[in-house]
Amino acid sequence: MTQKRVLTGITTTGTPHLGNYLGAIKPAVRASQDASLSSYFFLADFHALIKCHDPERVARSTREIAATWLALGLDTDNATFYRQSDIPEIPELTWILTCLCSKGLMNRSHAYKASVDANRDAGNQDLDDGVTMGLFSYPVLMAADILMFNAKHIPVGKDQIQHIEMARDIAGRFNHTFADLFVMPEPMIDDPVIIPGLDGRKMSKSYDNTIPLFCSEKELLSLIKQIKTDSRLPGEPKDADSSTLFELYSLFASDQETAEFRSKFEQGIGWGDAKLELFESLNGYLREPRLRYNELMQDLNSVEVLLNKGAEKAREYSVPFMREIREATGIRPLNTTLVGAAKSAPKKKEKSAEQLANAEAGRRRGILMQLKPLLDQVAGAEDKAAEAAQLIATKRAEVDSLKKKAQQKAQNELEILLEELAPYLV
């Protein structure tokens, strides 16, 4: 049975906290232990450079995140665990995809639009002030991360769906222009678990309200004591469902322990005692992985060995695939034609109906992206019917004037133009 290929990356700009663990790390560790999955997990250190220009922070975060995933049980024998920067084929593919990606697609990126809006709101005449090319075009790097390993299933939050759609658009354009090499990725959307921070808002580095996953016992207790509570005194019943203390407790405790803690809230437990119980629960849950984490941080050579092993495993796929991609784009040795003629053509594997449908959908999306300016031209014309008829006539003339592969490409475009412009041609 074909394994389901899943890919996830984590940006190396911060120290992992409880929110990261429950939202991303725990599901990734579970997936790495599932033999039915082909899992790829990577440290996105190139992505870190988009917003963070502090080299020590990036290096420290890379160490901490790698040790965290391993301490929590990531199975590096079953899964492929690697550093993004250890796979040179990824930036190479990024450039090839950049040469196919339209600027208009990047203009619609949420991150870029947010930066432009912030400059506009601040009254800045230069709407691109502070926007680097890394920020502007990082969806292409994300597409390369995914397409390099032809990952089909990408776990993302709802705010990341756009990036998967962009990866599909870029893959479709490549498949249409050069060769049908890329699988169309699909987002795997899970209902997000909102982890409350010290102030009750979502736990986030941006709010400075996080609890580091592997801080010391002393620091853990100190942070828990900072969690905001209301003014109800010991003996007064308390609402467990509106309490950050209770919510954090329930995320790590068993159902029975959670029910007992709720009962104590109803009986009026004091906030100090509730915080102490949360500390005991969290500390007990994290004690063993914390010890393992500290051991790994003192033995980074062993972590490096595992990352190198993962890179080798990943490159067993990326190196030959990159060779195919280069060949498709015309970047080849001068004697490729002679070598290719001497080899017998390998028998192609038959594709399933789903694969064929996905390939066709990707091909169509790629063609539509290239035809968009022409379709917009018709949509904006005063006499849409006349404009559409003229466009079809021009494309038909182009088809007649071309030969072989170029003619087929133009014919494919003509067919889609006829479909899209049908309402104007009636």
Image (spheres, rainbow, N blue to C red):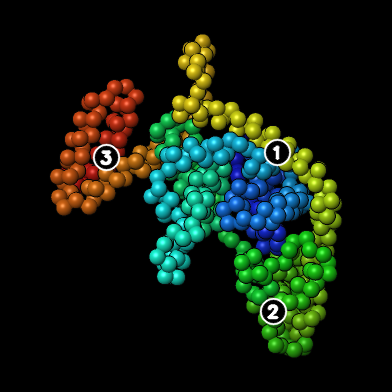
Query: Which secondary structure, mark 2?
Result: loop
Question: Where's residue 400, x and y in %?
Answer: 22, 26
Side (left or right) of 416 relative to 162: left
Front one among 81 and 330: 330
Side (left or right) of 365 relative to 52: left
Q: Earlier in the sequence, mark 3 or mark 2?
A: 2
Question: Rounded to the nearest whole Å, what is the CA distance between mark 2 and mark 1?
Answer: 42 Å
Query: Which secondary structure, mark 3?
Result: helix
Side (left or right) of 12 relative to 185: right
Question: Rounded to the nearest whole Å, what is the CA distance between mark 3 and mark 1?
Answer: 46 Å
What is the number of the mark on residue 228?
A: 2
Front one among 295 and 94: 94
Q: Residue at image x 15%, y 50%? A: 383
Residue type beneath disc 1: Gly
Q: Quadrant of the N terminus?
A: top right
What is the number of the mark on residue 417?
A: 3
Residue type beneath disc 3: Leu
Outermost top residue: 342
Q: Which residue is mark 1?
A: 310
Question: Rounded to the nearest whole Å, what is the CA distance between mark 3 and mark 2?
Answer: 60 Å
Q: Earlier in the sequence, mark 3 or mark 1?
A: 1
